[in-house]
């Protein structure tokens, strides 16, 4: 993202005052005794830098740019793409534009994006934080920049956030499988220290423990987030082929579930005849696939609307940034055809000879 030029930058580059630039922008050069040469230089630089005078004038009057920044994990992901779309629509209804960016779980990229967003004079930020953003979040608080965290929090920092109960979503999915007769349940996740993924794993494990099922580490596969595509598909395929005892798979996030479907097809496994499948997060493919996939759905519309509405309230001083507001929403389990009651394999009765 290129730094957005500001009225201050125009003034600094021409070595004149911000007030002078403002008068030129608002057509008051002659009235305020500004020379035609100076006015011409201002107009030329505005055109060269792609400066938006109308936006700048409004910002000068109100102290607000009417833009917000949205920094999320992955714009191509079903969950984040839908979050972004709803936030954009709600922001537009309120007269705001949205700058979008993805950090791909990179601390360095996330830090860089926050700096660039602040330099672009956004009025506030909605952020899906990486684990290493603690310092930057504390600086946002210190600077009194309005912001809301979504999808995950940073431990030990009180902030405004909208998240879901990842633990209960995973617990309910695992309990559903157990209730339907599955006991050898594989768990497929990513290598990460993100709290939401830790909570999903904890929900899976505690559901097993509470149903007197031993937790087997061999039943857990964690792939690298960077290993997207074919490499992850092959890892899942190898995991399934090496663990013939598994009767169900729990995918900790939707993109892994999509890869998992392809991996199972390559391994010659039929869902749910050979193995049941559930996933955290929904995806259009999960509804359209035959059989459709059981999921714990995040309430996307509610998350997005609450996040943008809270941010706008912070921007407009309807609530104070120091009065942190945390909301935890519950996932919605949608039972579909990929996890039916397990059919027990009955041994044929011996033939009685008269």
Image (cartoon, rainbow, N blue to C red):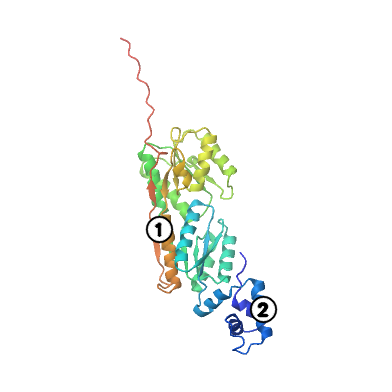
Q: Horizontal placement of 304 versus 222: left or right?
A: left
The spot of residue 313 in percent (x, y) is: 42, 70
Q: Is residue 301 above or below residue 280?
A: below
| Disc nearer the start of the sequence (2/1) | 2
- Which residue occupies the foreground of this view, 273 or 141? 273
In the rendered structure, are the residues bearing label 2 and label 1 in contact, judged by CB atoms less than 8 Å apart?
no
Could you tell me if residue 146 is visible in this image? Answer: yes
Task: Point out the residue furthest to the top here.
Answer: 354
Which residue: 57% across, 60% down? Answer: 107
Q: Is residue 197 above or below residue 30?
A: above
The spot of residue 79 in percent (x, y) is: 48, 53
The spot of residue 55 in percent (x, y) is: 55, 74
Which residue: 41% across, 62% down? Answer: 306
- Which residue occupies the foreground of this view, 51 or 87? 51
Could you tell me if residue 159 is visible in this image? Answer: no
Q: Which mark is drawn over residue 302? A: 1
Q: Secondary structure at mark 1?
A: helix
Distance from disc 2 to disc 1, alpha carbons, whole Å, reads: 45 Å
Q: Horizontal placement of 211 versus 222: left or right?
A: left
User: Mark 2 sits on what residue?
Assistant: 13
């Amino acid at each position: 993202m290129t730094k957005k030029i500001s009225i201050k930058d125009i003034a600094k580059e021409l070595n004149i005052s911000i007030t002078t630039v403002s008068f030129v922008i608002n057509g008051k050069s002659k009235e305020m005794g500004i020379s035609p040469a100076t006015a011409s230089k201002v107009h030329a630089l505005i055109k060269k830098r792609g400066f938006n005078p109308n936006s700048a004038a409004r910002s000068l009057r109100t102290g607000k740019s009417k833009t917000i920044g949205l920094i999320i994990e992955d714009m191509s992901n079903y969950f984040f793409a839908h979050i972004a779309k709803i936030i954009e629509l709600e922001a537009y209804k309120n007269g705001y534009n949205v700058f979008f960016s993805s950090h791909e779980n990179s601390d360095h990229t996330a830090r860089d994006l926050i700096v660039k967003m602040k330099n672009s004079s956004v009025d506030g930020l909605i952020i899906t934080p990486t684990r290493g953003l603690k310092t930057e979040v504390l600086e946002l608080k210190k600077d009194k920049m309005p912001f809301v965290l979504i999808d995950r929090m940073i431990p030990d920092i009180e902030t405004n956030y909208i998240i879901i109960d990842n633990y209960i979503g995973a617990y309910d999915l695992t309990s559903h499988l157990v209730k339907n007769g599955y006991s050898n349940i594989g768990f497929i996740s990513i290598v990460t220290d993100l709290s939401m993924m830790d909570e999903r794993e904890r929900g899976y494990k505690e559901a097993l423990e509470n149903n007197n099922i031993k937790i087997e580490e061999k039943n857990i596969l964690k792939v690298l987030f960077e290993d997207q595509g074919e490499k992850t598909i092959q890892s899942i395929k190898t995991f399934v082929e090496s663990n013939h005892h598994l009767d169900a798979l729990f995918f900790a996030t939707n993109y892994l579930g999509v890869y998992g479907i392809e991996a199972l097809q390559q391994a010659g496994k039929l869902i749910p005849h050979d193995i049941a499948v559930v996933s955290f997060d929904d995806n259009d493919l999960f509804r359209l696939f035959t059989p459709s996939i059981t999921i714990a759905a995040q309430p996307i519309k509610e998350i997005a609307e609450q996040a943008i509405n809270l941010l706008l309230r912070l921007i407009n001083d309807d609530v104070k940034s120091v009065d942190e507001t945390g909301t935890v929403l519950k996932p919605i389990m949608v039972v579909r055809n990929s996890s039916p009651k397990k059919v027990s394999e009955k041994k044929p009765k011996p033939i009685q000879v008269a």
